[in-house]
C-alpha cells in the first residue's frame, strides 16, 4: 500500500501529496475542512496528528478545525480508532494519556487502565493442579477487566478540552453508523482471529462475513456501537458505568461466565498520576509511570548506557550493551513492578542513577549474561498486545501521546450484550501464577498478582523527549516490545545528527526481555555479520517471523517550528504486535 501525506504549514515532507492512502497522514486541514459538517476551516500549521488509521486522523483534525484543542482531538481520535481498529482498542478497553498543556507547562499522565473485577482472583484462572488455564484469561468475558476508555473520554473533555462530547464523538458515531471499508490490515488480523470470533455470534456478526474474514473493501457497520457512542455523547460516561447499559453489559458478561458486577462499573475511576521523568544525554524524557513499567524500564536501561558511555563504543559493543541493559531492566520489571496503589514498588531506587551504575557493573563486554545468573523473581523478598498509539501537537503547543489497548487482537472476542462494545482481555496482563508467562511471554510475581480493583502491569509507554533540537512525541503498540521500540527510537534521536520522525519510526528493531533468554530481531533487518557478532558473545538470536510495532511520532523543530509526522511503515503491512 502506498503513502499519502498532507502538509501542515512548513512541514518538511519529500513524499508526494498525491500518493495513495497511508495508515498515517500529515493533515493539511485547509485541504479537506470543507468536507466537515461544520464547514469550518483551519489555517495551515494548525495541528500535527499521527495515528494508526487515516480516518482517525481525519476525525482529530475535524475537531481541531472546529476550534478544538489537542485534548479535544484526542477524544475524537480515541473514539474513531475504537471504530476502525476494533482489533486494537475501543470503549471496552483501556489506555494511557500523557498530556502537556502549553499555557502553563502542566503535565499529567491519565491512567485509564482496566481494573480487575471485585470477584476475580488468581484461583479462578487455575486448574485443579494450580496451573494457569490460558483460555480463561485470554478469551471470553472471564478475560475482561473493567474498561477505562469511556471515563477517560469524559476526563479529557471536562478538565482539558474546550468542546463537548457531542461534538468530539460525532466523527466516530458517523463511522460506526455508516461504516468503513476494511483495508488489508483489517482483513489480515480478522483472518488470524477468525476462530475466536466465531466462538461468539455477536462478534462474528459484526467483524466477519458469514463466519469468514471479510474481503478488502467490505463495509464494516457497527450500529449498536454507534448508539452507545450517541448515549455517551449526550449523557457522559455515567451512562456506560451506571444504569440500563451497565446492567445489560453485566448480565451479558455474567451469563457467559464472567465476573463483572454493577459495583465494579460504578466504582471505576481514571487516575491522574505524576509522569515518570529522567534525563538521558542532555534530554528531558517524560513518560509513563506505574502501572506502566515503561518509565522505570527505560530509566534504568538508558541510565545504564550513560554509565557505560556507549556512544564511544563500536557498533557491536554498543548493541551488546544495550541488550544487556534491557535484560537487567526487564529482570527488575518481573521482580518488583505492579500497581503501586496495591504493592510497595521501590520506584526511587529503580529510577536512580546510582542503581543503574550498580547494574552496569555486572555487564561483561565480552559475553552475554545468562538470565539465569540474574536475581530470580523468587528472591524478590530478600531484595528489599493489541494496542494502538497516536501523537498530537496543536497550534498552541498542547500535546498528547496516547497508547490504547484491548490487549490481544480483538481482545476477548466478546461483545457485551447489544452495546456493540468489544471487551478487552487484559486480565492476562496479571501474573496469573508465579513465573507463568502471559500472551507476550512476560513473567512476574506477587507484585502483579490478580487482586480486586487492581490494575495489571503494562508496557504501554507514551513519551515526550525534549532537548535543544526540539520535541519528539512518540509511542507504539507491540506488547512487551513497546518499551524496547520506544528506547531504540530515543537512542537514535539523541545519538544522530538530525531528527527525522519518519526515520525514527522506520528503524530496524531488536528486543530482549529477560525471559525467555533470547534476542529477537526483525527479519530482513540486520546483516549476517551483525547477528554473528551477537552469537559470538553467547546471545541466542531468534529471527522473528514478522516485523513488529506501529510507531506514531510527531517532531517539532525548536528553531524553525517545522513539524514532521512519522508513521511506521510496518502498519501498512498489517503488523499489530
Image (cartoon, grey):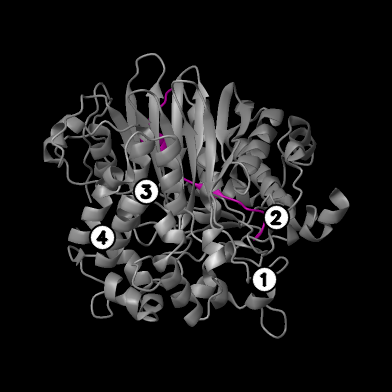
SS class, disc 1: loop
Residue shown at 61% from the left, 27% from the top: 280
Residue linked to disc 4: 184
Q: Counting residues from the N terminus, which is met first, the one under dot 2 or under dot 1?
A: 1
| Mark 1 residue crowding within 10 angstroms, few (<14) / some (14–19) / many (20+) | some
Query: Vertically, is 359 above or below 383?
Result: above
Q: Nearer the viewer, residue 121 or 224?
A: 224
On-image quarter of the C terminus: bottom left
Residue linked to disc 3: 78
Q: CA distance from mark 4 to mark 3?
A: 21 Å
Q: Counting residues from the N terminus, which is met first, the one under dot 4 or under dot 3?
A: 3
Query: Vertically, is 263 above or below 471?
Result: below
Viewed as shown, does residue 165 lie left or right of 337? left
Q: For the residues carrying marks 1 and 4, which lies nearer the camera in this image?
A: 1
Magenta stretch in the rendered image? 498-516
SS class, disc 3: helix
Q: Counting residues from the N terminus, which is met first, the one under dot 1 or under dot 3?
A: 3
Q: For the residues carrying marks 3 and 2, which lies nearer the camera in this image?
A: 3
Viewed as shown, does residue 523 lie left or right of 306? left
Asked if disc 2 and disc 4 are in contact, CB closer than 8 Å, the reply is no
Q: CA distance from mark 2 to mark 4?
A: 36 Å
Residue 5 found in image quarter? top left
Q: For the residues carrying marks 2 and 1, which lies nearer the camera in this image?
A: 1
Q: Of the numbered discs in the image, which one, if any, rests on residue 121?
A: 1
Q: CA distance from mark 1 to mark 3?
A: 30 Å
Asked if disc 1 and disc 3 are in contact, CB closer than 8 Å, the reply is no
Q: Counting residues from the N terminus, which is met first, the one under dot 2 or under dot 4?
A: 4
Spot occupied by residue 503 in the image (x, y as percentages of width and height)? 38, 35
Residue linked to disc 2: 334
Q: For the residues carrying marks 4 and 3, which lies nearer the camera in this image?
A: 3
Spot occupied by residue 301 in the image (x, y as percentages of width and height)? 65, 39
Amino acid at each position: 500500500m502506498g503513502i499519502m501525506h498532507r502538509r501542515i504549514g512548513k512541514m518538511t515532507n519529500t513524499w508526494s501529496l498525491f500518493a495513495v492512502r497511508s495508515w498515517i497522514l500529515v493533515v493539511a486541514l485547509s485541504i479537506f475542512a470543507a468536507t466537515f459538517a461544520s464547514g469550518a476551516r483551519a489555517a495551515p500549521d494548525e495541528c500535527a496528528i499521527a495515528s494508526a488509521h487515516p480516518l482517525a486522523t481525519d476525525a482529530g483534525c475535524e475537531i481541531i478545525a472546529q476550534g478544538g484543542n489537542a485534548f479535544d482531538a484526542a477524544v475524537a481520535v480515541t473514539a474513531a480508532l475504537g471504530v476502525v481498529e476494533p482489533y486494537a482498542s475501543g470503549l471496552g478497553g483501556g489506555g494511557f494519556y500523557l498530556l502537556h498543556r502549553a499555557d502553563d507547562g502542566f503535565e499529567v499522565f491519565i491512567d485509564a487502565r482496566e481494573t480487575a473485577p471485585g470477584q476475580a482472583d488468581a484461583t479462578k484462572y487455575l486448574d485443579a493442579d494450580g496451573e494457569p488455564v490460558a483460555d480463561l484469561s485470554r478469551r471470553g468475558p472471564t478475560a475482561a477487566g473493567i474498561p477505562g476508555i469511556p471515563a477517560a473520554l469524559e476526563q479529557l473533555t471536562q478538565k482539558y478540552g474546550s468542546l463537548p462530547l457531542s461534538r468530539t464523538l460525532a466523527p466516530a458515531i458517523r463511522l460506526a453508523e455508516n461504516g468503513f471499508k476494511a483495508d488489508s490490515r483489517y482483513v489480515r488480523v480478522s483472518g488470524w482471529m477468525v476462530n475466536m470470533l466465531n466462538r461468539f455470534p455477536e462478534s462474528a456478526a459484526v467483524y466477519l462475513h458469514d463466519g469468514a474474514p471479510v474481503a478488502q473493501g467490505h463495509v464494516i457497520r457497527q450500529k449498536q456501537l454507534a448508539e452507545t457512542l450517541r448515549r455517551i455523547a449526550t449523557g457522559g460516561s455515567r451512562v456506560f458505568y451506571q444504569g440500563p447499559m451497565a446492567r445489560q453489559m453485566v448480565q451479558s458478561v455474567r451469563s457467559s461466565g464472567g465476573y463483572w458486577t454493577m459495583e465494579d462499573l460504578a466504582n471505576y475511576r481514571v487516575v491522574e498520576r505524576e509522569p515518570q521523568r529522567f534525563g538521558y544525554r542532555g534530554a528531558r524524557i517524560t513518560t509513563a509511570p506505574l502501572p506502566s513499567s515503561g518509565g522505570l524500564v527505560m530509566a534504568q536501561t538508558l541510565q545504564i548506557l550513560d554509565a557505560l558511555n556507549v556512544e564511544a563504543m563500536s557498533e557491536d559493543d554498543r548493541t551488546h550493551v544495550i541488550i544487556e541493559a534491557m535484560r537487567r531492566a526487564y529482570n527488575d520489571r518481573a521482580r518488583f513492578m505492579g500497581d503501586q496503589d496495591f504493592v510497595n514498588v521501590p520506584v526511587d531506587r529503580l529510577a536512580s542513577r546510582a542503581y543503574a551504575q550498580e547494574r552496569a557493573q555486572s555487564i561483561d563486554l565480552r559475553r552475554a549474561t545468562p538470565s539465569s545468573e540474574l536475581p530470580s523473581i523468587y528472591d524478590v523478598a530478600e531484595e528489599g498486545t493489541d494496542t494502538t498509539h497516536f501523537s498530537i501537537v496543536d497550534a498552541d503547543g498542547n500535546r498528547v501521546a496516547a497508547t490504547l489497548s484491548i490487549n490481544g487482537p480483538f481482545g476477548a472476542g466478546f461483545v457485551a450484550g447489544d452495546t456493540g462494545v468489544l471487551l478487552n482481555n487484559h486480565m492476562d496482563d496479571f501474573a496469573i501464577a508465579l513465573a507463568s508467562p502471559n500472551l507476550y511471554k512476560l513473567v512476574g510475581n506477587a507484585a502483579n498478582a490478580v487482586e480486586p480493583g487492581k490494575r495489571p502491569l503494562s508496557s504501554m509507554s507514551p513519551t515526550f523527549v525534549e532537548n535543544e533540537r526540539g520535541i519528539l512525541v512518540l509511542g507504539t503498540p507491540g506488547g512487551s516490545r513497546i518499551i524496547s521500540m520506544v528506547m531504540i527510537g530515543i537512542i537514535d534521536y539523541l545519538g544522530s545528527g538530525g531528527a527525522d520522525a519518519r526515520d525514527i519510526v522506520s528503524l530496524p528493531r531488536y528486543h530482549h526481555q529477560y525471559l525467555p533468554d533470547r534476542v529477537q530481531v526483525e527479519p530482513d533487518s540486520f546483516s549476517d555479520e551483525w547477528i554473528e557478532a551477537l552469537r559470538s558473545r553467547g546471545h541466542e538470536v531468534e529471527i522473528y517471523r514478522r516485523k513488529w510495532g506501529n510507531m506514531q511520532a510527531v517532531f517539532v523543530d525548536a528553531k524553525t517550528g517545522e513539524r514532521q509526522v512519522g508513521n511506521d511503515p510496518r502498519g501498512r503491512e498489517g503488523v499489530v504486535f
